[in-house]
Amino acid sequence: MKKIAAIIISLIALNVSAQSHQAYEAGEWFRFRIHYGVFNASFATLEVKETTLRNQPVYHVVGKGKSTGLLHLFFKVDDNYETFMDKKNGAPLRFIRQIDEGGHTKDLLIDFDHDSNNAHVFNRKHNRRETYSVPENVHDMLSSFYYLRNNLDVNALDQGEMFNIKMFIDDESHDFKLKFLGREVVKTKMGNIAALKFKPYVLAGRVFERKESLTIWVSDDKNRIPLKIKADLAVGSLDADIDAFKGLKYPLNIIMK
């Protein structure tokens, strides 16, 4: 069960070029219900706020994941992720990762300097500071998803198309790949919703069964919100479905209730 909430919160995204529109605004919130086998394993939420950082207005996104029920007695998950993004281009300025996953804990604060392409990492758990070089246009685990929502040109997507994004996680940069699988209709508790289907390429091993173990569906509309996630884990499988939402910038296109 380790990193299950993180899978939902981070929602691996893709990188495209020019911004097309603003898909979200302050006040947006949605919640996922996560199932592990027959258990309701946890909930994960994402919320968009507004604040200031370094004397500039930014979007402040907060992601939380928490285990529930019997699972919480055996394997506690209590995660908090935050990103502070430039309102003009979506670039991450600060990223916070505070996790407790079965006793495995982290408490990191990362400040991005895009002029010098550096990430300044403050490990608050061990009171240690390090600086790392990062690629241009790098993103964190949350800002990547919101960048995707703003920049995805859905009319130009071809089935089988591959995308890349540069992400900095903890203390190293990663080159994630994402494949567009096509369009489907996803059944949700709100009704049937047209969706875009993607398959991120993840690291096989302790968490995932193979590198193509994760599939993500996002709404095929101007919101581009996550609707469903399926994962084949090294032990068992995971399903996550959107459970509630509010504050969407655009009406959700529900085909049939």
Image (cartoon, rainbow, N blue to C red):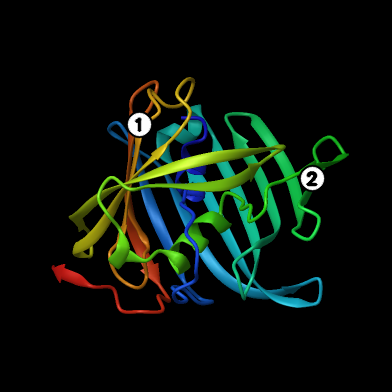
Which of 155 and 33 lies nearest the eye of the viewer? 155
Q: Is residue 120 above or below residue 147?
A: above
Which disc, if any, is residue 36?
Answer: none
Badge 2 crowding class, 10 Å Cα cut-off, few under 14, some 14 to 19, many 20 or more, is many
Which of 221 and 47 lies nearest the eye of the viewer? 221
Seen at 48% across and 28% down, the residue is 203
Which of 249 and 66 lies nearest the eye of the viewer? 249
Residue 237 x %, y %: 32, 30
35 sits left or right of 151 in the view? left
Badge 1 crowding class, 10 Å Cα cut-off, few under 14, some 14 to 19, many 20 or more, is many
| Residue 123 seen | no
Q: Secondary structure at mark 1?
A: loop
49 sits left or right of 72 in the view? right
Which disc, if any, is residue 121?
Answer: 2
Q: Is residue 49 above or below residue 219?
A: below
Report which residue position mark 1 lands on. 213
Q: Secondary structure at mark 2?
A: strand
| Residue 162 seen | yes
